[in-house]
Image (cartoon, grey):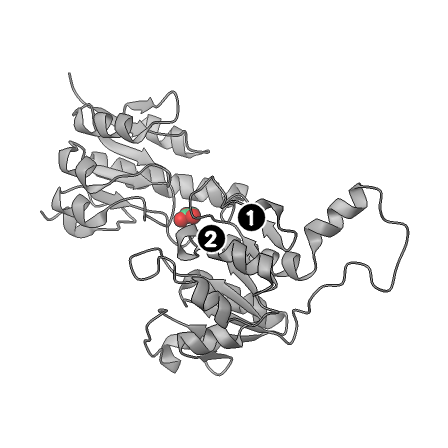
Amino acid sequence: MTATDFLVTTPLPDPGMRLLESAGSVTVAGTRMSRDELAQACASGDYRVVVAQLRDEFDAPLLDKARISGISNFAVGYNNIDVTAATANSIVIGNTPGVLTDATADIALLLILAVARRAVEADTFVRAGKFHGWEPELLLGHDVSGKTLGLAGFGRIARATARRALAFGMTVEFCPRPPGDRVVSDEELGEFAGRVRQVPWPELVANSDYLSVHVPLNAHTRHLVDASVLSAMKRSAILINTARGPIVDEQALVAALREGTIAGAGLDVYEEEPRLAPGLAELPNTVLLPHVGSATVPVRAEMARRCAENAVAMARGERPPYPVNPEALAR
Ligand code: GLV
């Protein structure tokens, strides 16, 4: 039997499935695949390329046994894949960079504003019939304009967030590779030269009225924001995470929010998605979104197109347009 070209773990939005179906044979997993089902499918030799989601874990033992030539991830992030093991096994990985930058920065700003101005509490209040007219001290929140936004990271999404924050009259500081340091030249800063300030990580933590996380998840950034960082933040500070859940120690965050160590948090991602740390959902000073940073119709359509284009190239043994580990092809 010849191998099916594409194993799709979850159907892609338009035009993803159409592109795959016009390029080769497609199998769509009937139900959500467990880690063992995915491992079995990858080892079977029945599929050339897996079109995968962030929740599909490709660990080293799975990849060492896999008989596939590529994984096309429907995401810009790829922390669900052990890249070193994939490369060692000549498995190419593709992702969808660039298209979700603005949409995710919009969600960072949305969370800043929603937590600061208690938008979800206020909405619940109105719907509950509790609004009896304007009151001088009804649902008072925090200012945004004139406040300092600290950006952990200074990649594409952080820069798009900085652009928005500057337009809101915020002061923007950043640390490009926390907790370490790396000097970003004015040339690299481009449009931001003279408009944002680079500071070391401890200073960023201490200065920020809003601390927003924009780093990839890796061994250096896991629990970057832990109990000690939370206790070094201002008591009035608000933490925003649109990057990856495990960058923040969620249990420590719940404790910090309960004890008033910081004032609030806006989260789009969680340490053990879709589970929340005990107590998080009960805290009023949080706004919690279900990982929707890239969730607009046009963005998801463009992600689907890129994901499908990557997969089609991989099935043909060609370099995908958006490769994570092109060196795997040369092996
Ligand atoms: C979403 O989190 C992505 O990495 O695309």
Mark 2: amino acid:
Glu
The image shows residue 72 at horizontal and vertical percentages of: 30, 40
Q: Residue furthest left?
A: 331
Q: Is residue 281 above or below residue 229?
A: above
Q: Which residue is mark 1?
A: 280
Q: Which residue is mark 2?
A: 250
Q: Answer yes or no: do the residues labelled 1 and 2 have beta carbons within 8 Å?
A: yes
SS for callout 1 = helix
The answer to which of 82 and 281 lies nearer the viewer is 281
SS for callout 2 = helix
Question: What residue do we see at 40% from left, 34% from top?
Answer: 16
Left or right, residue 321 beside residue 317: right
The image shows residue 283 at horizontal and vertical percentages of: 62, 50
The image shows residue 213 at horizontal and vertical percentages of: 46, 62
Question: What residue do we see at 52% from left, 50% from top?
Answer: 268
The answer to which of 63 and 294 lies nearer the viewer is 63
Q: Is residue 327 above or below residue 67?
A: below
